[in-house]
Image (cartoon, rainbow, N blue to C red):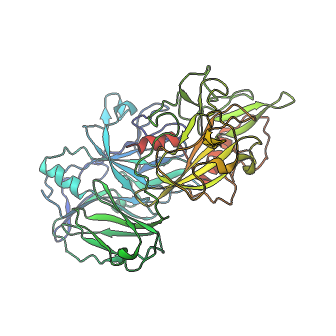
Amino acid sequence: MRTPCSRTSGMLLCAIVAVAIIENPTATLAGQVIVQPGPSIAQDIWTRNSFDAKGVTDEKLWVGGWGDTYYTYIRFDLDNLPQHADSAFIQFYSYRGPHAGYSHIPMYMDRVTQPWDYQRPDGFMPWSSKPQSVFLRMLDAPTDETWYSIDVTDLYNAWQAGTLSNYGIGLRPTSTYDQFNYFWSSRYTGNTALRPRLVVNTAATHTTLPAYTYDGVNGPQTIKDVRTGERNQFSFVFATTNVGARCLVSWTTTFRNWFALIDFNADAVGTEITDTTDARQTFYRTTYLPAGVSPAESFDYPIGTGAPIPEQITPERNDLYPSGATSDPLRERASPTADWRNVQDVGSYYAETNSAGVWMWEGLHPGEDWNKGSFNEDGGESVRCVANGQVILIKPVAESGVAASAGYVMVVRHWLLNGDSIDSLYVHIAPDRHAGSANSAGVIGAKGDFTYQEGSNVAKGSIIGVIGAVSSFYSHLHFELRDKAIDPTAPLWAHSTGDAYYGPEVGQTGNRSRPMSKPDVEAAFRLMRADGIIDPSDFIDDHRP
């Protein structure tokens, strides 16, 4: 399912960017060098795997997408620069982009591991020539009209020492539902001072980092500390007790994420943790967790053994939409298989005939439908929790306005090591127990038959239910992941057409007897993002052990 270009759904389109160093670095302060290349030696370029599959040059660099996907790569020549830096940063200037209604996103930072050249005989950085890379860490989303700094101190020193080859870094979006980060390139002419730059500091001022007090109640809070010294030293002091609470303290350094988990009890008063890792830009975050909940360190699939499962959708990206009223792309495989398969992908288009024989679209599908065998053969198959978390909701699907006799929906909240949360939804399931025994037949049964109830803490891989033997349609697991916290008292698919599919408008409006147009699809994707919907399998594959 995964390719070198991460994606959630939609047409795949990526940007590749390279920046070379200017011949004469500028010394702006004592011990500081800034290099900022211009157009004559710039290597900025976008390349894409659609249209002509060739790159183009202009004044902007993008990371993100709207169903499609944009990557950025950047490299500086380090010749004639200091052999060791106390701190080094790659900086982009973030500007307000042209798309209406978009939002900024965090990014994955990669270290490029092979040589690459933007200019080739077969065109400007063809899509097939993207460089390979390895994941380093996650970066925060930028803010409009300000400099965005990426700490590369340890990379810079490793490059200069020769322990790592300098092929630059790559930036990838964490999501692509009308989400963009816009930066000026080295060819920007509106204000040449806003082109990308490398800042190297060799005479840093060492300062004392204060201790942060956390009482186990008021959270989360995020503290960003950009250090210019050789080593970060910080402390979290737990000054008061909140018995039964948990605090996840996370901090991100250049090469990895760190975390400490504190259980609040009488002994926790005055507890102090200290970090002395060699990193100059660190993000500290304290997040309140319910008592006994463990952070989600990794994710697995909800069915089978938890191992990766091919989605078996060709193509997996959701860029095929109907050209006629009877078109129904990406609905399901031509024939069932004995193995697990994704019969209806997130973002796929669904239509069917009504009682009068007229084709009517339902809209875009908000999750993945997992099925095994033919028809109802998978009724009673185990459903497993994808990561450590806590059950926050169990209720009949019918209460969400989808369909009667459609089983239950369970929502589990997962806290990531960086303090963010992800909600997983398991729809059309039945309790794992029935009449005192394992529910191998998928009998819908009573809510009280679930082993894990609302408020229960659950570990990754635990059986939380089974696929229900529903009567409204063939049995299957509808599975979703959302990066927006679900309100258990609110509708689960608040921005849908009313039946958990997403169209261009909320509710049963519009002419549903015609195909959805491209603007309809784009509007539907925006509404899906309003409910926090992301591509489940792509996220799991990016967060496996």
Residue 519, by quadrant, is: top right
Residue displayed at 56% across by 56% down: 484
Instruction: Give the residue displayed 27% in from the left and 75% down from the top.
Output: 209
Q: Is residue 283 left or right of residue 368?
A: left
> Residue 366's quadrant in the figure?
top right
Please name whichever residue, 48 or 403, is drawn nearer the observer in this view of the structure: 403
The residue closer to the viewer here, 88 or 452, is 452
Expressed as whole percent of the image width and height from the top left, the position of residue 14 reads 44, 40
Q: Is residue 303 visible?
A: yes
**Quadrant of the frame with the C terminus:** top left
Q: For this view, does 281 lie left or right of residue 460?
A: left
Point out residue 99 in the picture as x, y percentages from the top left corner.
Answer: 56, 53
156 is higher (above) or lower (below) than 135: below
In the depicted structure, whether residue 26 falls above or below residue 53: below
Relative to 470, is 104 on the left or the right?
Answer: left
Task: Give the residue at the far front of this rendering.
Answer: 436
